[in-house]
């Protein structure tokens, strides 16, 4: 999930927000301001209801951010770098640059998020109780009570034992510790996520026809998301098992053809396009990688602009490149592959380009690894 804009850094981790957050923010604020609060706490002005609804929605998303920051902090303490945190339609995502080394680390990283949400819920519940004892039942107590309840519900939902929820990570840690097989544990958690998704879709459709309306459809949508995410996690787990022990140097294409960023798109089309068998071309200066241009990017330049457009202008820039070392484990590289580079990484040694890893290189490595596992009956670790 890519961020539409950045908010800054928290605990050294870049924080981003996807545009879909605005949709759910508006829906939450509207539901509270126009329905729940006026119905439950009548007698206030429309301004008061909207102020309470907007404030509650903002604090709710701050709670989601605290949930994800907690994951990031514990991950860093367990030796895993965190690329960024992105808030989106279904909550938040902490993008980790690696996996937990052991079940204990997995347990700590996964468990801290729901614990933080639970503590936030308890905090607002206590504040709501104190305010109600001092002033009686009112709009402020209602907003605080809603924040308490929604954070407790968030904690409970997240500990359901199904990937990609935090509870799925907890389940994976338990199965991993019991069996010693990381891949098997990941598959178990992913299939539990698939099952939960089916249940949520069924319940959502049932509620919709019972008159729940948007609430039922929303539940079904969450179930659909869980099924897709769980399937992706199972595929990733099996890929990781097949690639375990494989180095970047084992799969890369060594000494790839390169070009200068000053070359025009027209020159590239005339002299490189048909002679060069790969679909990506690293750009270098004195042997150092400074960019990466793909055929898809070149194809998007109109013919009348190719003479005046350089490869450097249409390439992934240096700051967007995915760089790897030859001795790095391929499983550590996979989470870092960016969309800009179309799944490619440039391999460098002493800051000089020595190879490139493409999706086809990874696909061949997965096929070889899967065949090796079938022949040896190997188990993940």
Image (spheres, helix red, strand yellow):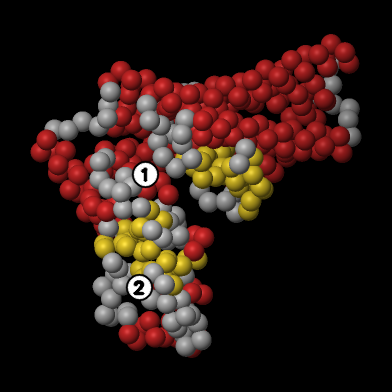
Q: Quadrant of the C terminus?
A: top left
| First in sequence: mark 2 vs mark 1 | 2
Quadrant of residue 196 within the rendered picture? top left
Q: What element carries label 2?
A: loop
Q: Residue at x 23, y 52 (%)?
A: 250
Q: Quadrant of residue 128?
A: top right
Q: Which class describes the residues within 10 Å of circle 2: few (<14), some (14-19), or many (20+)?
A: some
Q: Residue 258, labelled with which disc?
A: 2
- Residue at left 28%, top 67%? 255
Q: From what the image shows, is residue 221 above or below residue 285?
A: above
Residue reaching furthest top?
133
Residue 248 against residue 55 in the figure, above or below:
below
Q: Which residue lies furthest to the front in this view?
A: 350
- Confirm or deny contact between disc 2 and disc 1 (CB under 8 A): no
Q: Residue at x 72, y 37 (%)?
A: 58
Is 70 rendered above or below residue 346? Answer: above
In the image, 212 versus 249, the foreground residue is: 249
Q: Picture coordinates of residue 86 (x, y %)?
A: 57, 44
Is 221 drawn above or below residue 259 in the view shown?
above
Relative placement, left or right, of 347 versus 114 is left
């Amino acid at each position: 999930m890519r961020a539409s804009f950045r908010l800054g850094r928290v605990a050294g981790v870049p924080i981003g927000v996807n545009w879909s957050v605005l949709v759910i923010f508006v829906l939450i604020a509207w539901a509270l301001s126009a329905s729940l609060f006026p119905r439950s706490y009548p007698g206030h002005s429309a301004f008061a209801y909207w102020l309470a609804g907007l404030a509650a929605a903002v604090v709710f998303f701050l709670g989601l951010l605290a949930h994800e920051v907690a994951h990031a902090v514990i991950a860093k303490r367990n030796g895993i770098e965190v690329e960024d945190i992105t808030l989106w339609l279904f909550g938040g995502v902490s993008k980790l640059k690696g996996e937990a080394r052991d079940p204990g680390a997995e347990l700590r990283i996964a468990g801290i998020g729901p614990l933080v949400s639970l503590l936030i819920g308890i905090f607002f519940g206590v504040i709501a109780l104190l305010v109600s004892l001092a002033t009686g039942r009112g709009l402020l107590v209602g907003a605080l009570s809603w924040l308490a309840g929604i954070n407790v519900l968030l904690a409970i939902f997240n500990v359901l034992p199904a990937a990609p929820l935090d509870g799925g990570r907890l389940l994976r840690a338990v199965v991993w510790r019991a069996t010693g097989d990381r891949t098997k544990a990941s598959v178990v958690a992913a299939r539990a996520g698939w099952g939960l998704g089916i249940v949520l879709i069924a319940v959502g459709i049932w509620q919709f026809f019972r008159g729940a309306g948007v609430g039922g459809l929303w539940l079904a949508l969450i179930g659909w998301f869980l099924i897709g995410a769980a399937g992706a996690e199972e595929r990733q787990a099996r890929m990781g098992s097949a690639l375990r022990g494989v180095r970047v140097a084992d799969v890369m294409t060594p000494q790839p053809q390169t070009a200068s960023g000053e070359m025009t798109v027209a020159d590239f089309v005339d002299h490189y396009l048909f002679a060069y068998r790969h679909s990506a071309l690293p750009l270098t200066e004195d042997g150092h990688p400074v960019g990466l241009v793909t055929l898809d990017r070149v194809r998007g330049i109109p013919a009348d602009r190719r003479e005046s457009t350089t490869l450097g202008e249409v390439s992934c820039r240096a700051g967007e490149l995915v760089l790897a070392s030859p001795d790095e484990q391929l499983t550590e590289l996979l989470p870092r592959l960016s969309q800009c580079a179309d799944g490619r990484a440039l391999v460098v040694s002493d800051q000089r380009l020595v190879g490139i890893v493409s999706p086809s290189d990874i696909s061949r490595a997965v096929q070889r690894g899967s065949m090796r596992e079938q022949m040896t009956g190997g188990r993940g670790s």
